[in-house]
Image (spheres, helix red, strand yellow):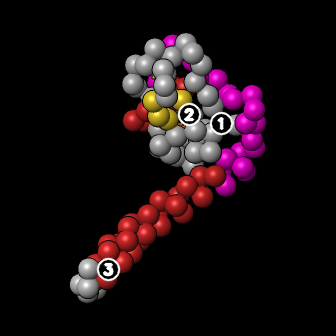
Amino acid sequence: MALWITDECINCDVCEPECPNQAISMGPEIYRIDPDRCTECVGHFDQPQCVQLCPVDCIPVHPQHVETREQLHARYLRLQAEQQQRPQASSQGVASALAEQGKPAEA
Ligand code: SF4
Ligand code: SF4
C-alpha cells in the first residue's frame, strides 16, 4: 500500500529528506506522496520512515493504493533499476551533445 499525507500536515519538512525513494515532495499547500514511488519503505527499512518521524501522525495508508508486499518489492526493484540507468543516460546525453558540437566524447 502506498501511503498518503492528510491535510493535518504542518509542513515541518521532516519526512521529505528521509524518504529513500524520493516519493515525498511539496504540493501546493502541504507535502504529498507519489504513490508510484512509495514502497512503504519495503526494500530499505522495516518500517515506513515518514510514519515513524511524522510529529502529527498524518500519514495513513492510501485507501486507493492497496498493494501486497510483493507489489511493493517489485516497485522497489523498478526504482533501483531506474536509478542505476540514470548516470548512463546522463553520460549518453553528454556524448550526444558533444557529437552535435563536432567534439569527440571522452572514452
Ligand atoms: S513509506 Fe517510505 S517510501 Fe513511502 S513515502 Fe514514506 S518514507 Fe517514502
Ligand atoms: S513529517 Fe508529517 S507534518 Fe511533517 S511534513 Fe511530513 S507529513 Fe507533514
**Residue 19 horizontal/vertical position (percent):** 47, 38
Residue at left 60%, top 19%?
6
Above or below: residue 43 compared with residue 88: above
Counting other residues with Cα less than 10 Å from the Cα at mark 2, is it few (<14), some (14-19), or many (20 or more)? Answer: many
Q: Nearer the viewer, mark 1 or mark 3?
A: 3
Residue at left 47%, top 67%?
85
Name the residue tied to disc 2.
33
Residue 62 shows in the view: yes
Residue at left 50%, top 45%?
21
Residue at left 63%, top 39%?
35
**Pointer 3 residue Cβ closer than 8 Å to ligand 1:** no
Mark found first going from the N terminus, 1 or 2 = 1
**Pointer 1 residue Cβ closer than 8 Å to ligand 1:** yes
Q: Amino acid at mark 3?
A: Glu
Q: Residue furthest front?
A: 101
Task: Give the Cα distance between marks 2 and 3.
Answer: 39 Å
Task: Give the Cα distance between marks 1 and 3.
Answer: 43 Å
Name the residue tied to disc 3.
100
Position of the C terminus, as image quadrant, is: bottom left
Q: Which residues are magenta?
A: 53-74
| Foreground of the two, 86 or 42 | 86
**Residue 62 horizontal/vertical position (percent):** 69, 29
Q: Are marks 2 and 3 in contact (CB under 8 Å)?
A: no
Q: Are marks 1 and 3 in contact (CB under 8 Å)?
A: no
Mark found first going from the N terminus, 2 or 3 = 2
The kind of secondary structure element at disc 2 is strand
Position of 92 compared to 69: left or right? Answer: left
**Pointer 2 residue Cβ closer than 8 Å to ligand 1:** yes
Q: Nearer the viewer, mark 1 or mark 2?
A: 2
| Foreground of the two, 106 or 76 | 106
Q: Are marks 1 and 2 in contact (CB under 8 Å)?
A: yes
Name the residue tied to disc 1.
2
